[in-house]
Image (cartoon, helix red, strand yellow):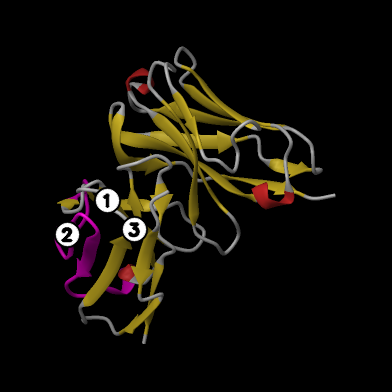
Amino acid sequence: EIVLTQSPATLSLSPGERATLSCRASQSVSSYLAWFQQKPGQAPRLLIYEASNRATGIPARFSGSGSGTDFTLTISTLEPEDFAVYYCQQRSNWPLTFGGGTKVEIK
Amino acid sequence: EVQLVESGGGLVKPGGSLRLSCAASGFTFSTYRMDWVRQALGQGLEWVSSITSSSSSTTYADAVKGRFTISRDNAKNSLYLHMDGLRAEDTAVYYCARRRTGDRGDFDYWGQGTLVSVSS
């Protein structure tokens, strides 16, 4: 099973700041990595697919990079609605696995 | 508009059974792989099971293999998860999710979830 390790667990930032979230895979997942945002009481929302492609309707301030085992989600300028939990997920191998999440909270 | 609506959750005793349903609309259901993902309260996301668009292939997480069965009825635009031998650790919100591109791709649409509670 591919283990995805997200860091940091919590990121305390202010609106307008830049957020950099990391996801590291225990073995190569090529570019088969996605990022999701989840707010309390809501279903996850796809932000980035195949490591660097923004999903439909996702603002340009969200960007993804990386391949193989190391991936990054960057939020260039945090908006108030961006404070949430973010998960990475791989579909390179069965079973599909998710990272443990990074909570982006207001400082 | 793509919509996924889960139902069938509830309180069940350990060892009991439950069938979850996911009603799909707003897209050609029969051409998309579908999955179930669960989330225990306050915890992260855990993939449960996947089924191809034609039902030709199903895959399960080890934690549910042999106890859960995924199926679909393309004529009714519906996805199902039959759960037997339920355990306390199966307590979670269960989401159905569509794959972005046919039988491959990432989860681009999710339902709102249905809560399954396993307790005596």
> Compared to B107, does A61 lie above or below?
below
What type is the residue that disc 3 sits on?
Ser
Asked whether residue B1 appears in the rendered view, the answer is: no
C-alpha distance separating marks 1 and 3: 13 Å
Mark closer to the observer (3, 2) = 3
Residue A26 has which mark? 3
Subunit that carries the residue with mark 2 = A
C-alpha distance separating marks 3 and 2: 14 Å
> Residue A72 at what x, y percent from top left?
22, 65
Q: In the visual, does B6 lie left or right of A25?
A: right
At 59% across and 56% down in the image, what residue appears? B40
* Foreground pick, B55 / B6: B55
Q: Are marks 1 and 3 on the same chain?
A: yes
Label 3: few (<14), some (14–19) or many (≥20) C-alpha neighbours in 10 Å:
few
Subunit that carries the residue with mark 3 = A
Instruction: Please give the range of residues in magenta.
Output: A54-81
* Foreground pick, B100 / A16: B100
Q: Of all residues shown, which one is farthest toward the bottom?
A: A107
Closer to the chain start, of discs 1 and 3, is: 3
Subunit that carries the residue with mark 1 = A
At 20% across and 78% down in the image, what residue appears? A18
Residues at discs 1 and 2 in contact (Cβ within 8 Å): yes
Q: In the visual, does A48 lie left or right of B119?
A: left
User: In the rendered image, which residue does mark 2 sit on?
Assistant: A66
| Image mark count | 3
Label 1: few (<14), some (14–19) or many (≥20) C-alpha neighbours in 10 Å:
many
User: In the rendered image, which residue does mark 1 sit on?
Assistant: A33
The part of the image, by quadrant, that contains residue A52 is: bottom left
At 51% across and 26% down in the image, what residue appears? B79
Which image quadrant: the N terminus of chain B?
Answer: top left
Label 2: few (<14), some (14–19) or many (≥20) C-alpha neighbours in 10 Å:
some
C-alpha distance separating marks 1 and 2: 9 Å
